[in-house]
Amino acid sequence: MPQIQSDALVFFGATGDLAHKKIFPALQALVKRGSLNIPIIGVAKAGWNLDQLKARAKDSLEQHGGLDPIAWDKLSSLLRYVDGDYNDPATFSALRTALGNAQHPAHYLAIPPSLFEEVVDQLVKSGCSKGGRMIVEKPFGHDLASAQELDRILLAAFPESSIFRIDHYLAKGPVQNMVSFRFSNSFLEPLWNREHIESIQITMAEDFGVQGRGAFYDQNGTVRDVVQNHLFQLLCNLAMESPARKDAESIRDEKVKVLKAISPIGNEDIVRGQFQGYLDEKGVAPNSNTETFVALRLEIQSWRWAGVPVYIRAGKNLPVTCTEVITRFHCPPVTKFTPEGLPQDYIRFRVNPDMTIAMGVSVAGAEQNSPRELAELVASRQPTAEQMEPYELVLTDALCGDSSIFARQDYVEEAWRIVDPILDASLPVFPYAPGTWGPKDAKAFAPPRGWVNPVVDANGKTAKPPHA
Ligand code: BG6
């Protein structure tokens, strides 16, 4: 059934950081493609007027990707601005007026979750929520209980089908490619299970710190910031069964099933780290115990995956910026022909900064009688200029009502259920030097045959196959 197209986009937090870094550039790109021609109403409490918002938008475009004069003229003509307190009914009557004849506005909350309740309440009271959609940014709560509370707030005004929870990782081409690679290659299916796969490891490394987001980060930490959402989504893409149909619910059903098969993570299955210097970051509590690095272990207890250990590692101020998944196959049996210690086959999915899908295989060395070596069969494509950036894609899909790349509430709750025990702030956190692979305890806590540290060249691209 065709979905209704939203006829206005309202974004709360218009003067904030997210709008500056991501939303204005995405809006300009959509206007440039000719796919956005509705009023765009920024709302904030800054004491600004429309000209000031436009100046901010212009600055955002100049700093993030460049200003396109023709697209900017058009975008500028679509922009409106409402200034006021989120708990003041006058702000929302002004919004209702700015909405004009719009019947199906999409409201995008690019604001701290603590403000959601009053904004949603005022949207309902002012009639602005009627016929509309709600787009929200992670974090969706800070644990299971708060996620359920947040859902209660949103459901009071919008049905689940009109709520779009952004996880921008799902809008990355390489993340989507994992699914298409798995289900478009029939050779993979017989191998993709506990009979053949020995372990799975996922690394999300970033070579920068908290980048001025100390106050936000300190309330969250790595598990909440990227593991519970982005990295679990990668895991689901890797582990889920083929959806019965192409629609959003069929796809999301399969992802939820993966999470349902994972038990809550115990304290013995996690190592937390904090980079040295973190406590000096602005906004960070002087004695903060928040993790900026985590390595954890879990298992998907399903027929396909039971017994295959899954290791996830993520952190700030690591040696490179790269997100990569390695699935290692069991070694061949030791026979009189195949000696012990052969290189181990693997499949590698790199999803950031470039897209790589590669298969590591064992081949004879170049010299006669030299030991077997690992070679990579690489299928790699760079994103092309026509491909949408994640925020373009999430806005496009939310405005036309396609939920496929948004997190459903049951998924969000399952993900919190799994990490809830390790959110305990009193768990030990070990220091590590910036530019290293986390605390030394994380090295000991490793997949069979160790972690594969992604290798990246000066351009941020795959430099050489990792030793797997
Ligand atoms: C965000 C996290 O969701 O994702 C950040 O809050 C992280 O801490 C970012 O740096 C990574 O996303 P990307 O697209 O830059 O890899």
Image (cartoon, helix red, strand yellow):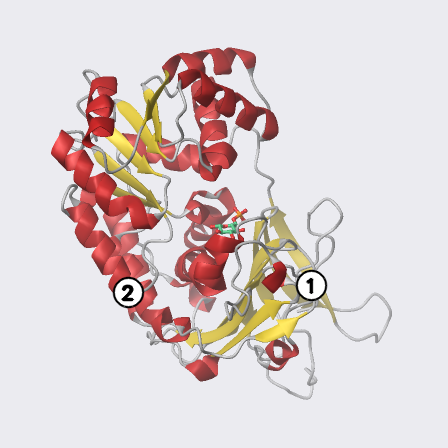
Tag 1 residue:
434
Query: As displayed, is residue 186 above or below residue 130?
Result: below
Q: 398 and 129: which one is in front?
A: 129
Q: Identify residue type, mark 1.
A: Pro
Q: Residue at x 24, y 49 (%)?
A: 249
Expressed as whole percent of the image width and height from the top left, the position of residue 251 reads: 30, 51
Q: Identify residue type, mark 2.
A: Leu
Tag 2 residue:
144
Expressed as whole percent of the image width and height from the top left, the position of residue 214 reads: 53, 54
Whichever of labels 1 and 2 marks the residue nearer the N terminus, that label is 2
At mark 2, the secondary structure is: helix
Query: As displayed, is residue 327 above or below residue 215?
Result: below
Binning the other alpha carbons within 10 Å of mark 1 as few (below 14), some (14 to 19) or many (20 upward) gives: some
Expressed as whole percent of the image width and height from the top left, the position of residue 20 reads: 50, 33
Evaluate whether residue 245 shows in this view: no
The N terminus, quarter of image: top left
Q: Residue at x 17, y 33 (%)?
A: 129
Query: As displayed, is residue 210 above or below residue 370?
Result: above
- Asked where in the image residue 159 lies, by quadrant, the reply is top left
Expressed as whole percent of the image width and height from the top left, the position of residue 60 reads: 54, 28
Using residue 370 as the reference point, say whether residue 52 is left or right of it.
Answer: left
Q: Residue at x 62, y 82 (%)?
A: 444
Residues at badges 1 and 2 in contact (C-beta under 8 Å)? no
- Asked where in the image residue 53 lies, by quadrant, the reply is top left
At mark 1, the secondary structure is: loop
So how many labels did they put on this image? Answer: 2
